[in-house]
Amino acid sequence: MNNLIEHDTARPSRSNFYTLAGVFLILVGMIILADQRLHTGWLIYTIPLLAGLALIWRGIRLASAGLLISGGLTAGSGAGLLAALGPAWQTSLHHRITLLVAFIALGWVLSFWLTGWFGRRWLAWILIPAGISGATAAWFWLNPIRPAEYILIIPAAVGLSLLLCGILQRLFGLIVPGCILITSGPGVYYAWGQVGQPNGLVQTATMLVVMALGWGLITVFSRVLTSSFVWWPLIPGGLLAMVGWGLYIGGDPNNALKFIGNTGSIGLIVFGIYLLMWRNEIRRK
């Protein structure tokens, strides 16, 4: 008896799926015929976009996260193909690649919103590929030739994505690499990617001190998840800062005091933010 009931309830779902697939195949055939007739050069690129919209509609009906993610990515990729390969944009190749990657990033963002709003589950891991693809698009748009900006943008974007994912999912294990990556990319870039007179000690010192700030951020963002003081990140952060300051003094003693003052002031700002968060926590209690 139960098998008969399950079979009856599954039949309308299968019927709707076949109806959707049939309508989609008819539309694809009509688009291909119209493109061959009109020679638009872009009409055929609407097929992935329509496929994505169909998957989204099906995912909303079934509240399926898999269909919503597939639909969001397919729709974003289809819109990217339409924008990059269509005749409306008479731009260079790297700008077309930028448009394609940017729309893929928007597809990930759309998938994140769809799964949270219609699938009733906010899948924070989607922010990681969204951040990577968005940062790649930004790198292509700003400077498609030099790889130094890629070292700056990609680790920072991945770190920010991991940080947001850790905060949303309340996972301290994602906050730690997120904070470290946020400062690792800028540390390497500002130390070794700038054009100027090379100084190995100064460049290494700059990289270490900037990375030390990332360890301090772990303590700051730990306040979001716990009311206890997470002190252990200050040990590697303090060691990196002390070694970096020492190397800078050895490499450029004339400007060492200015460098220590600037980076130390940033550390004080980070610690002040932590104290403000601690004060708000005490008030809530």
Image (tube, rainbow, N blue to C red):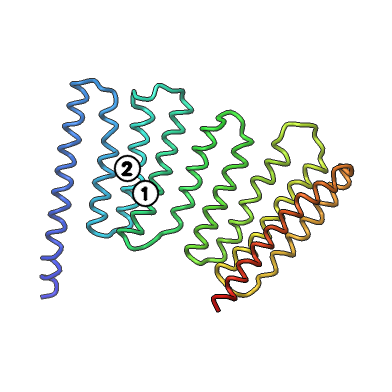
**Which quadrant, please, contains the C terminus?**
bottom right
Q: In percent of the image, x 82 and y 46: which residue is there? A: 258
Which numbered marker is on residue 75? 2
Image-based side of 226 in relation to 123, left or right: right
Image-based side of 189 in relation to 281, left or right: right
The earlier-in-sequence mark between 2 and 1 is: 2
Query: As rendered, which of 53 and 67 lies closer to the eye?
Result: 53
Query: As rendered, which of 71 and 255 lies closer to the eye?
Result: 255
**Which quadrant, please, contains the N terminus?**
bottom left
Mark 2 residue type: Ala
Q: Residues within 10 Å of mark 2 (few under 14, many from 20)?
A: many
Q: In percent of the image, x 49 and y 47: which residue is there? A: 131
Query: Quadrant location of residue 105?
Result: top left
The answer for how far apart the CA atoms under marks 2 and 1 are is 9 Å
SS type, badge 1: helix
Q: Are marks 2 and 1 in contact (CB under 8 Å)?
A: yes
Location of residue 193 with respect to 221 vertically, above or below: above
SS type, badge 2: helix
Mark 1 residue type: Leu
Residue 202 place in picture, x, y as percent: 81, 43
Query: Quadrant location of residue 31?
Result: top left
Residue 113 place in picture, x, y as percent: 37, 54
Q: Residues within 10 Å of mark 1 (few under 14, many from 20)?
A: many
Q: In percent of the image, x 55 and y 50: which residue is there? A: 158
Question: Which residue is tagged 1?
Answer: 110
Query: As rendered, which of 252 and 34 lies closer to the eye?
Result: 252
Residue reaching furthest to the front: 283
